[in-house]
Image (cartoon, helix red, strand yellow):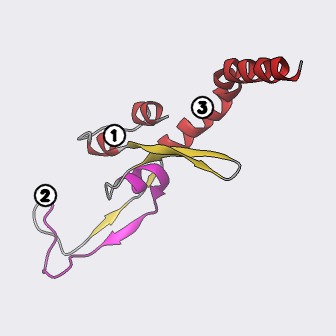
């Protein structure tokens, strides 16, 4: 799942993509839990998107921009890339194929024990 999420992550610097890491699989009541996580502050904005918003300087008079200092700026926002959500959907769709050999082996073992 992590590799699928990384493959779907838009890349400028690569920091968001490289920050994605596998959540260790853990046994929970009723099954198992795992997934993908990132502690990089921008990752959530790439995943979920950002609404248009004003940007104001904090603790100084102007923002540093590529075009010189500005009193403020307007971000147009952007749609989310939903890379982790898409990776989860891919795994969910593939789960029957992934699980089938294990379930077949488990079922055969149960039947062997019962006879």
Residue at screen point 31% across, 37% down: 11
- Left or right: residue 27 versus residue 43 is right
Question: Can you tell which of label 1 and label 2 is closer to the viewer?
Answer: 1
In the rendered image, the residue lying farthest to the left is 68
Q: Position of residue 98 (x, y in %)?
A: 63, 23
Q: Is disc 2 placed on a helix, strand or loop?
A: loop
Residue on which the image places disc 3: 90
Q: Is 18 placed above or below 66 here?
A: above
Q: Position of residue 41 (x, y in %)?
A: 32, 59
Taking the image as shown, residue 37 lies to the left or right of residue 40, namely right
- Separation of marks 1 and 2 at Cα, in angstroms: 28 Å
The residue at which mark 2 appears reads as 67
Of 113 and 23, which appears nearest the observer? Answer: 113
Precedes in sequence: disc 1 or disc 2: 1
69 versus 44 height, above or below: below
**Quadrant location of residue 53?**
bottom left
| Mark 2–mark 3 distance (CA, rounded to whole Å) | 42 Å
Q: Is residue 81 visible?
A: no
Contact check, label 3 and label 1, Cβ < 8 Å: no
Report the span colored magenta: 43-65
Q: Is residue 85 visible?
A: yes
Q: Residue at label 1?
A: 17
């Amino acid at each position: 799942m992590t590799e699928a999420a990384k493959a779907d992550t838009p890349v400028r610097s690569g920091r968001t993509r490289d920050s994605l890491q596998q959540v260790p699989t853990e046994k929970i009541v009723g099954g198992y839990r795992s997934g993908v996580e990132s502690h990089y502050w921008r990752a959530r904005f790439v995943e979920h998107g950002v609404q248009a918003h004003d940007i104001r300087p904090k603790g100084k008079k102007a923002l540093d921009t590529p075009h010189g200092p500005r009193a403020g700026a307007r971000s147009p926002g952007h749609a989310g890339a939903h890379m982790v959500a898409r990776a989860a959907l891919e795994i969910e769709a593939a789960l029957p194929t992934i699980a089938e050999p294990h379930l077949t082996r488990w079922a055969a073992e149960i039947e062997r024990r019962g006879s």
